[in-house]
Amino acid sequence: MSRVFDDLGGKFQARLRDHRISAKTSRTREGEVMLLSTEAILEVRFDLDVLDRLHEPCFAAIERPTTDGRTYLVYEVVGVRPMHFQMLGMDVAMPTVIRREYLETIHSSWGGSDETWIDVIAVPTRYRMDISEDGEPIFSRSELVPLIGSPARLLSSYAVRKFLCRDDGAVAGTLLGFNMPLTIDMESLVRYHTGVFGFTGSGKSNLTSYLLRQAWRAIPDLRVVILDIAGEYAIHLADILLESGIFYSTENYEEDIERFLNSQTVPETLEDKLGNDKLEQIARALFRQDKIKLLIKESRERGTFTIEHILQVLRSVWSEGKSGKTQALMIMNHIENKLLSDNRYSENTPLHELSERDLAILSDVLREALGSVNERSSLYGEVSTLLNYIENIDEMAPSSDDSERKVMTPARLAQYVLSGDAEQLIICYLPEPDTARLVASRFIDSLLLLKKTRGARRKVLVVLDEAHEYIPDRTKDADYSASSNRSVEALLRQGRKYRAHCWLATQRVAHLNVNALQQLHSYFVSTLPRFYDRMVIADAFSLSYGVVERTTELDTGEWLFVSYKATKQKNVPVFLKTPNNEELLLQSLNRVL
């Protein structure tokens, strides 16, 4: 058992003094939020080495007798307070002379008196640890509560590795407090959607870029599309962009190197390391290799989909017995009666050949269905995607101009991503938020529809930087936030079964669509100065507020990480120091330039 516990050379001696439920409230734009958290109070014998260790992240195992024998309940330490008996009776209302005498007594007693101890606040991980006959820790879910007076011990690095780390997993970072790598299942991090939340300067794009490098290593055939409002990824991933990437922008740079570099955000630390000459060399190489291209938001490709594509989606809901199948049948009957029978269109008729009146009928039918089905049903997501696509079809017929056909549009981008010729990395620089939302909506709708109707199997990861611009909690039709919200939510809800995945990065957590936020299975949280942002994170992901509060102490490059899928056990918060993407970039640039 010595390798399972770390008693710090016999110095760590602790027992459970209290087990309670605490409440914390906050008023947000949606109303008052109340969080209830279970806390254990451990009373630990005072020792300076123990106190210093407890300031670092650690896990405590509280002994618990059961009818089947002894087990240990795993708790995570979130707060530490050195205590002295005389502190309990001291008050500012005391005369100054007496108060000073108390303080001098307390000061001289640390570590040399039985009247000193350490109060440790710990929160449950909802796991128990049993120890096998050969001394191996075995972890399982548990709702057992500990008994007051029970002894507690610290988990060793060995036990924590067995608790959290995936065998042969990708390195997400170094576990703070244990100085060892946390290995995770990178495919799960991609497949089940991920969020990166942190204030400006916390290193969101740096972390996202590092994780993308790990994702490509784990999933070589993965295609990544980054919708970048702030212009941060062309430099962070310049080596990948040069080797197997392409850069689209709604701005036409006309091969102006200075204009391109001025439009991109380069961290000061990276700018100092690269220097202007290297940055210009990167931009010159991108233009020379024809990797910087124009993206226009208007699509002229109304003929991409037919009536049959719409019916295929609805038939899938009906034939597979999914939620909303009755309504799907009603929509199919309506389409057949209004379009195929009365107007004598065929199922192969391209949508651009429908009259304005018939497109309006189709849109009305789908919108009526959307209002009559449950938001959580399969049909709701399918109809949302179809409706967004139809309502965003341009009024012009497909162009026969060769030069026009070469211009990239959101719909063509979706086709390109799924083609065999697609680059590994596609960055779309969209500096104007309204345009970014429109492009995101059209691209995601086209991507999902292509995957549903053509069975495209290629794995695609969509990264939305500044995610609050795409999925705000309050939406309007005029700025396209309503359509982008519906599209992103459809991607998060339906995408996994079609191998379309999503990562979100933002600093404005409290302003996000909560329905979309709750679709994330993994998330990284750095410093969030606003109290209500931390409350939203704790509420959305069922975290103890004490854990989230510790993020205020994190330095740049340090993150709270929680995952339902990527770690060995689900929903266990850990604190990481993540690798610096800039160092990996510098090493790689020397090879590709």
Image (tube, rainbow, N blue to C red):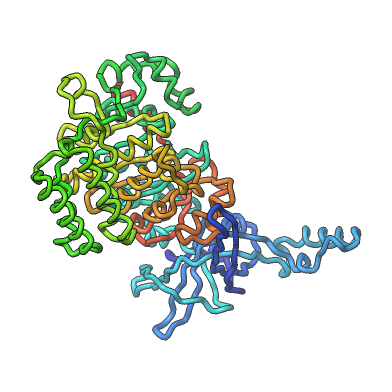
Between residues 109 and 176, which one lies in front from this camera angle? 176
In the rendered image, the quadrant that contains the N terminus is bottom left
Task: Give coordinates of residue 498: x percent, y percent.
Answer: 22, 50
Task: Give coordinates of residue 573: x percent, y percent.
Answer: 46, 57
Between residues 212 and 426, which one lies in front from this camera angle? 426
Q: Is residue 499 above or below residue 379?
A: above
**Residue 261 visible in the snapshot:** yes
Q: Is residue 99 left or right of residue 250?
A: right
Between residues 61 and 538, which one lies in front from this camera angle? 538
Residue at position x 54%, y 79% from top?
147
Q: Quadrant of residue 518?
A: bottom left
Q: Quadrant of residue 521?
A: bottom left
Task: Give coordinates of residue 444: x percent, y percent.
Answer: 29, 42
Q: Is residue 151 above or below residue 270?
A: below
**Residue 16 visible in the snapshot:** no
Task: Give coordinates of residue 30: x percent, y percent.
Answer: 53, 55
Residue at position x 17%, y 39% from top?
354
Q: Is residue 283 left or right of residue 537?
A: left
Q: Is residue 490 above or below residue 376?
A: above
Residue projecting furthest to the front: 342
Q: Is residue 532 left or right of residue 421?
A: right
Residue at position x 42%, y 30% from top?
432
In the rendered image, the quadrant that contains the C terminus is top left
Residue projecting furthest to the bottom: 67
Residue at position x 13%, y 52% from top?
336
